[in-house]
Amino acid sequence: DIQMTQSPSTLSASVGDRVTITCRASQSVSNWLAWYQQKPGKAPNLLIYKASILESGVPPRFSGSGSGTEFTLTISSLQPDDFAAYYCQQYNSYPWTFGQGTKVEIK
Amino acid sequence: QGQLVQSGGEVKKPGAAVKVSCKTSNYTFTDYGISWVRQAPGQGLEWMGWISPYNGNTNYAQKVQGRITMTTDTSTSTAYMELRSLTSDDTAVYYCARDWGATNGMDVWGQGTTITVSS
């Protein structure tokens, strides 16, 4: 199985900050990488797929980059609605696997 | 945009089975796969498996292989996930999600179904 490792596990930031979350794969997943946002008590919400393509309706302050084994999710200017957990997920090969998650907290 | 509506939460005893439904609407059911993902309390997301409503092909996570069965009913555009021999480790929120397969990720999710396993 491909292991996905996110860092950091928790991130404290202020409104307006630029935030970057890293996701590393144990082997290459090409660009078959998605990012999800999850708020407490809610289902995950797809933000980015194919490593860098913004899902329809997602604000452009979110961006994704990377390929192979290293990926990043960047929020250019953190907004109050962005405080949540973020997960990366590879879909290069079964079983699909998720990172352990990054919780973005208010500083 | 598609919609997925799941069945309600259940409490089960250890050793029992549970079957969760996921009724889809507003898209062609057989054009996309369905994945099931669970989340134990305070934990991350765990992919359990995938089914193609088009041909019934499945792919299950090793961890639940042998205890899980995913099925679909194309007449009602509904997917089902049955998990047997439940233990307390299966206590979680279970989600179904529309899965584009190896292209666009999981873009539409159900609201989640809480399954509690307790004696």
Image (cartoon, rainbow, N blue to C red):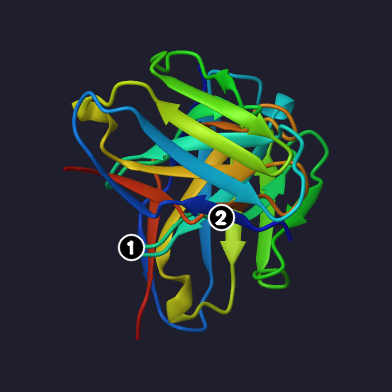
Q: Position of residue A45 (x, y in %)?
A: 43, 33
| Label disc, if present, on residue B42 of the rendered structure | 1
Relative to B88, A97 lies left or right: right
**Chain letter belonging to callout 2:** A
Relative to A79, A6 lies left or right: right
Relative to B92, A89 lies left or right: right
Q: Secondary structure at mark 2?
A: strand
Q: Amino acid at mark 1?
A: Gly
Q: Position of residue B115 (x, y in %)?
A: 40, 64
Q: Position of residue B47 (x, y in %)?
A: 59, 54
Q: Nearer the viewer, residue B9 or B75?
A: B9
The mark lying in front, picked from 2 and 1, is: 2
Give the crowd class for mark 2: few <14, some 14-19, many >=20 residues within 10 Å. Answer: many
Q: Is residue A48 above or below residue B13?
A: above
Question: What residue is at 72 percent from the left and 54 percent from the top?
Answer: A95
Question: What residue is at 72 percent from the left and 58 percent from the top?
Answer: B60
Q: Amino acid at mark 2?
A: Thr
Give the crowd class for mark 1: few <14, some 14-19, many >=20 residues within 10 Å. Answer: few
Q: Secondary structure at mark 1?
A: loop
Q: Position of residue B46 (x, y in %)?
A: 54, 57
- Name which quarter of the figure residue B62 lies in: bottom right
Q: Nearer the viewer, residue A95 or B30?
A: A95
**Mark pair 2, 1: CA separation:** 18 Å
Quadrant showing the C terminus of chain B: bottom left
Q: Which residue is mark 2?
A: A5
Q: Nearer the viewer, residue A53 or B70?
A: A53
**Chain letter belonging to callout 1:** B
- Name which quarter of the figure residue A39 lies in: top left
Does residue A58 appear anywhere in the picture?
Answer: yes
Q: Is residue A13 above or below residue B29?
A: below
